[in-house]
Image (cartoon, rainbow, N blue to C red):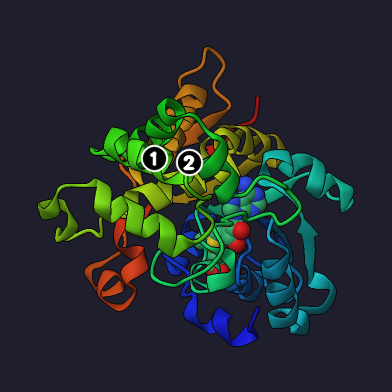
Amino acid sequence: MNLENREKHVPVLKDEVIECLKVGRGGVYVDGTVGAGGHAEALLRASAPNGIVIGVDQDDDAIKVAEERLKEFGTRFQLIHGNFEQLAQCVQSAGIDAVNGIVLDLGISSMQLDDPARGFSFQSEGPLDMRMDQRISRMASHVINDTSEVELAKIFAEYGEERYARRIARGIVQRRVKQPILTTSALKDIIRFSVPSQYRSGRLHCATRVFQSLRIAVNGELDVLSRGIQQAVLLLSPGGRLGVITFHSLEDRIVKQSFLAMARAAQPTVVRLFKKPICPSEKERRENRRSRSAKFRVIEKVAV
Ligand SMILES: C[S@@+](CC[C@H](N)C(=O)[O-])C[C@H]1O[C@@H](n2cnc3c(N)ncnc32)[C@H](O)[C@@H]1O
């Protein structure tokens, strides 16, 4: 992992996060997806001179990059290598029981996407890995080579909303009997051969949805999300706020429904700040292509 890569990751909706979480001096904040540390740095600056920020990430490379980037903040910044589905436990293990604000900026970072060795991108040759947490053993190559045709089609359809899911799953199964599929380019080629020719020249690359769906499956991204939100709410002090940035409709649906369920419960634990999500401005979308699909939703914990 090259430290210079962190410069390529531009935090999305940074000012909106600081404003909506009401970040101020002396507060305690958690960045549950610290990545290259862009949002964490903004939280540290906005809570100066004595605010505390705890950064959590399941990716060891991200932990190293954030550590190096934010060392100037000394003991005001603490790092935990963990999954936000155990956020309360992670943060409590650092001796902190309640916090004023939490941000989750979902998905992968540009650092992960741009590192061919991580296997997240079909744009470069690399192993079919896609694990955010390098401690887990099941990689994308295992999913591609061990999963039944029906299950593969289900993954592509459900997590990638891929219209040619069944054809692509069939193409994979036919190829893997001859030899295992181990690289990003091998998978990309199979996808290209499996879909109709007009789909190959569409605006979206024909491998985009399959790669997204595999990444979601390998990392259990949708399963951990609702647990992470519950954990975050547990950890907030009354009046504390949770903000979640999503990048596709599957994630946004889970966030929206989890927030609604808590806000409309017989004894509500949260209020929603806005009904509609905040989206990046025209300017941000122009300057940072990755921000184009971002949606930001915020809740505030109520005293019960
Ligand atoms: C979009 S990046 C965050 C970038 C960060 N906000 C910044 O400004 O640099 C998402 C990060 O969340 C991490 N991540 C994704 N799911 C996670 C989970 N369930 N638990 C912990 N970290 C997770 C990824 O490893 C990645 O580093």
State the residue in front, 127 or 229: 127
- Whereabouts is ligand 1, in terms of quadrant? bottom right
Residue tagged by mark 2? 177
Tell me if residue 22 comes above or below residue 209 in the rendering.
Answer: below
Residue 294 x/y as whole percent: 36, 56
- Residue 174's disc number: 1
Location of the C terminus by quadrant is top right
Q: Is residue 93 left or right of residue 225?
A: right
Tell me if residue 139 comes above or below residue 75 in the rendering.
Answer: above
Q: Residue 173, can we see it?
A: yes
Q: Is residue 187 left or right of residue 45?
A: left
State the residue in front, 173 or 128: 173
Tell me if residue 239 comes above or below residue 115 in the rendering.
Answer: above
Tell me if residue 85 comes above or below residue 41 in the rendering.
Answer: above
Residue 228 x/y as whole percent: 62, 39
Callout 2 amino acid = Val
* Residue beneath the point at 48% across and 80% down: 8
* Residue beneath the point at 42% across and 44% down: 213
Callout 1 amino acid = Gln
Cβ–Cβ under 8 Å for marks 1 and 2: yes
Quadrant in which residue 4 is drawn:
bottom right
Farthest front residue? Answer: 178
Residue 280 x/y as whole percent: 31, 62
**10 Å neighbourhood of mark 1: few (<14), some, or many (≥20)?**
few
State the residue in front, 281 or 1: 1
For the residues marked 1 and 2, what is the alpha-carbon distance in whole angstroms?
6 Å
State the residue in front, 4 or 156: 156
Residue 126 x/y as whole percent: 52, 68
**10 Å neighbourhood of mark 2: few (<14), some, or many (≥20)?**
few
* Residue beneath the point at 47% across and 46% down: 178
Quadrant in which residue 287 is drawn:
bottom left
